């Protein structure tokens, strides 16, 4: 009897550990498949390497596997949405395909928000997808406000909100223009060259600069 009790206790510990081991395996498998996706996106962002449909198909399979293993991971939804954005930009000559990919990306950003509602990047990316669709509505306004609320000094979030605002600048109500302008100012204080690139891309540097408050970095941006 004295030997049976330790054996029973050991068996109980093993049985209790099995779900934890299995969950750890799922997380590891999911992250292993997500790594090539992160690497590909970072490479495309930091170099002139062309994004191809074949490359997108390959890493899309990876992120789908990650989501199969870990369907509650907000980052994986964000990664897949980014791939759909690349796919949409490659299909700009086909308006129906472009809109379909952007709407799928929008849905994925909303899924990410559902799992991590305080993540400013998801809100910022949602505003960008709405801008690509030309939908400067209450959802767009909310996304811009939430990105500012949860990530006021997150450079990537501010740049994304800025681009969303620049896409529809002339369609925005004055109060929304003020919010986009604030994102531009915050981003300028961190990396004015990135802001200048966006403003020049949309030919809005001088209209935006005319409304910015002055600071050393903003002076460099606007000179």
Image: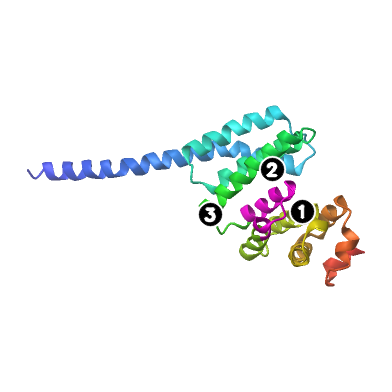
- Marked residue nearer the N-terminal end (2 or 3): 2
State if disc 3 and disc 2 touch (CB < 8 Å).
no
Q: Residue at x 44, y 39 (%)?
A: 26
Q: How far across and down, in percent of the image, does residue 33 sit?
A: 55, 35
Q: Is residue 26 rendered to the left or right of residue 221? A: left
Q: Residue furthest bottom?
A: 214
- Residue where numbered disc 3 is placed: 116
Determine whether the residue tagged by mark 3 lies in a helix, strand or loop: loop
Position above or below: 164 against 53: below
Quadrant location of the C terminus in the rendered image: bottom right
Task: Return the mark for residue 163.
Answer: 1
Q: Earlier in the sequence, mark 1 or mark 2?
A: 2
Q: Residue at x 88, y 59 (%)?
A: 205
- Packing grade of label 1 (10 A; few <14, some 14-19, many >=20) is many
Q: Is residue 129 magenta?
A: yes
What label sits on residue 42 in the rendered view? 2
> Which range is magenta?
121-141
Residue 101 lies, in percent from the top left, at 67, 38
Residue drawn at 57 percent across, 44 percent down: 77
Q: Is residue 103 visible?
A: yes
Q: Position of residue 9 (x, y in %)?
A: 19, 45
Give the mark toward the camera: 2 or 3: 3
């Amino acid at each position: 009897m004295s030997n049976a009790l330790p054996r029973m206790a050991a068996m109980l510990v093993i049985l209790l550990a099995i779900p934890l081991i299995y969950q750890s395996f799922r997380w590891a498998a999911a992250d292993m498949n997500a790594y090539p996706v992160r690497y590909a996106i970072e490479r495309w962002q930091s170099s002139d390497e062309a994004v191809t449909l074949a490359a997108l198909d390959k890493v899309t399979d990876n992120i789908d596997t990650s989501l199969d293993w870990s369907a509650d991971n907000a980052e994986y939804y964000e990664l897949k949405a980014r791939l759909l954005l690349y796919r949409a930009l490659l299909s700009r000559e086909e308006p129906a395909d472009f809109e379909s990919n952007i709407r799928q990306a929008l849905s994925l950003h909303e899924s990410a928000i559902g799992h991590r509602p305080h993540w400013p990047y998801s809100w910022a990316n949602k505003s960008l997808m709405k801008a690509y669709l030309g939908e400067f509505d209450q959802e767009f306004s909310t996304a811009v406000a939430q990105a500012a609320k949860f990530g006021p000094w997150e450079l990537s979030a501010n740049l994304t909100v800025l681009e969303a605002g620049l896409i529809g600048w002339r369609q925005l109500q004055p109060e929304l223009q003020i919010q986009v302008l604030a994102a531009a100012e915050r981003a300028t204080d961190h990396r004015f060259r990135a802001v200048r690139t966006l403003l020049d891309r949309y030919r809005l540097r001088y209209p935006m600069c005319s409304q910015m408050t002055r600071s050393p970095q903003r002076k460099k941006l606007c000179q």
